[in-house]
Image: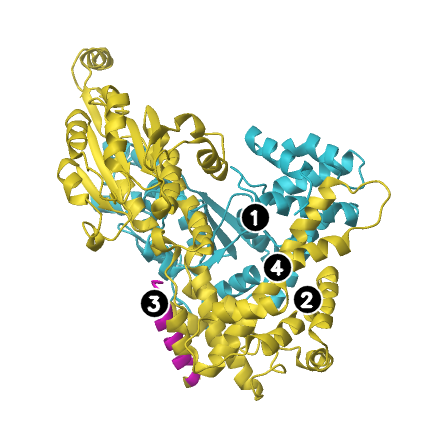
Chain colours: A yellow, B cyan
Amino acid sequence: VIAMLELITAFADDLRKAGLPVSLTESLDAVQALRHTPLADQQAVRCALGATLVKDQAHRAAFDLLFDIYFASRAVAEAGTEVGPASAPFGQVSPRSSRLGTLRDLSCEDLCEVLVKALLKDDCPAIDAIAVEAVTRYSTIQPARPMTDRYYVYRTLRGLDFDALPARLATVARPPTAAGPDPVDQRLAAAEHARRLGYLRGRVEAGVLRRLVAAQGPAAIASTLRKPLPGDVEFLRASPADLEAMQAALEPMTRRLTVRLMRRDRRRGALDSSATMRHSLSYGGVLAEPVFRERRPIKPEIIVLADISGSVAAFVRFTFLLARAISARFSRVRSFVFVDTIEEVTGLLAPDRSIQEMLDRIDRGARTVTVDGHSDYGNVLETFWTRCGREVNHRTTVLIVGDARNNHHLSQAWVVREMSRRARHLFWLNPEPRAHWDTGDSVMAEYAPHCDAVAECRNLRQLEHFVKDQLL
Amino acid sequence: MPDSVTPAGRDRPGPAHRFGSSGEVRAALRRVRYLADEHIASAVYLADRLGKPVLVEGPAGTGKTQLAKSVAELAGARLIRLQCYEGLDESKALYEWNYRKQLLRVQAQRILDEEPGPAAAGWSELESDIFGEEFLLARPLLQAIRAAEPVVLLVDEVDRTDIGTEALLLELLSDYQVSIPELGTITATQIPLVFLTSNGTRELSEALKRRCLYLHMGYPDRAREHEIISARIPGISSQLADQVVAVVHLLRSLDLKKQPSISETIDWAQSLRLLGSGRVSTDQAASTLYVLLKHQSDIDKAASQLSATASR
């Protein structure tokens, strides 16, 4: 029991380090929950700890990773076997090890052949066994070398010729019918294959992780693999997988913001004298109860100027998503994108389009590069000012999104000054950490004095804060 | 006033637990035709064992509310439901004094006083009378606490309330008691199973989350969805169910405005079956997509995805 207690404490500690708000109450609950859980059943333990320690679905991935680190390897240790192919997860040790015996004698080509067959049949135990064997064979983990798990996963998948598998599955699976295959079936088959390959990848990752933990201990691995939560991932450093997680986290966020928008303004407006008179008649002409007008919400127009050069592209994507989510708050949203030339994309951002589609459209349709593809804020601002400067007025909120890295062109900061003078508000969102501003070719300091606020927006959380505090 | 003998709180000794293991919960839920995965079963089981409420979060149409109903059904308990909305307050959630009845009582007293005879009751007696059990209107939360028979309390869409109202729940959820200034503290005689559901439109407070077990209910995996369809639509062919599930899972992987929920999937499978098709073909899928998707742009996108050839 004491060992369990210590394990939970260490586990909760690492969850906190990963950014999860685990309170003392919650770790006590976790221990309580384990008292009612069969400890030999890893899945049951995962459910019990998950229900007591994780209170936000966005934290789930971080929890699962740490759980694998802490408990998957422990199972191996308790089984009393050397960490190796035979150390299968709970329950299925015997059939697995015999299967592995035969797998070990196969050549690399034959192993791939067996794998394709297993994938076609969706034979999970077989896929599991092949994943274990592949990790043994190809990953060649050297505990002394400070390599990340990704490196070993990559090596293993390369050994299995992972990239060629979708094509192989498609050719083998296609039934030899006389009439051409139904497109729906084909599409479904492809999606199904992708799912099975995803499963295989997951098994390989789990296998590599188990090896690493066995070699270096859970605490060390937990610290090397610690990833920020989706809300905290920096836009500029996000990997494709991170972006996907952020996209998932964005959806509840926009929902929260929209709900906030729909809340009625409860503050009352000016006194409505005629309504008050009318109302007084029900009290025999005594002015007993004043009646107030409802406040009419001010609906400003918003103009978004977004730098879409490679360095900040990921960030812009989220800015547009948010701008669209809160567009009900504004009478009109006009969007411009630029690299060294500016182009209006308002028409491309129609509300019934999906996010991805609209970004693709921008990529295809917008002419933002005419010179060399390096951001030129000075030129862009000047062009905007001559073309649309007149449309900036006291009801306009201007939002400039970019890192202000001007590649040593002229900054033309006077445009920002003029714009800010005419506009209702002018905000600048910079996805770089504040410490990097004004280093190298960043000229943030030249623009900053003319803005109502310059916000550092390195991650989703900061972006949400900005929108909540400044725009709503 | 209900007697409060047993101290409420988690890990209270006394009443037999309702379930023996999470596997048992799963089997029992299956009997009432609710196909739970192990996360769901485990959360229900732990809620019973630890005496804690369960906060169920997830997209619309994944069976959050149904879970509470099914648990009530299998436990033979009464379901008490509190539907939350913006502006919900104490008098609607907890209790209210029956003002009209109190007024009548006071007026009746006055009439009695005017009648000759022995002096009627004094004010203090009257006061304790009108703030008694008889004049209390119990709203769902208080009903759940006072119930003598087993109950399941469902607080639906708790994210719609304001933060202030959320605080109302805290005392109830941690100690299973309600304080009424005029009456004192009313403690539950038996710990009800409590489910709170949320669609995640608002971040719930840490205090609330801390008191609850957390269960995220996403869309089911393919095997489970297949089972759900087969259970809900008796007589559907396994092949059709397979294809329906495959299409729906493909659609959920797309970037849609509103993803097809389980109930919509069931409706779609039902309509395909009524149309007499044994399998999903491109035409049929395209012509019935409106059952599954509720935005024209989503329907267009899904149709084009389904007809696109899979040469990848």
| Circle 3: element type | helix
Q: Which of marks 1 and 3 is in front?
A: 3
Camera-near label (4 vs 1) is 4
Q: Please, which residue is most extreme toward the front here?
A: A371
Q: Mark 2 lies on which chain?
A: A
CA distance separating discs 4 and 1: 38 Å
Q: Looking at the image, which residue is at 75% across and 61% down?
A: A121
Q: How far apart are marks 4 and 2 (CA)?
A: 20 Å
Q: Does the magenta stretch include residue A186?
A: no
Query: Do marks 3 and 2 share a chain?
Result: yes
Tag nearer the camera, 3 or 4: 4
- Image point 39% across, 72% down: which residue? A224
A206 sits to left or right of B129 = right
Q: Position of residue A411 (x, y in %)?
A: 19, 37
Asked where in the image residue A293 lies, by quadrant, the reply is top left
Closer to the eye: label 4 or 2: 4
Q: Name the foreground residue: A287 vs A75.
A: A75
Residue A323 at x, y = what percent?
35, 35
The tag on residue A124 is: 2
* Dot 1 crowding, Cα within 10 Å, few <14, some 14–19, many 20+: many
Q: What kind of element bears circle 2? A: helix
Circles 3 and 4 on the same subunit: yes
CA separation, marks 3 and 4? 37 Å
The disc placed on residue B63 is 1
A5 sits to left or right of A41: left
Tell me the kind of residue under disc 3: Arg
Residues marked 2 and 1 touching at CB (< 8 Å): no
Q: Residue A16 carries which label?
A: 3
Please state the chain letter of the residue tagged with numbered disc 1 in the rendered image. Answer: B
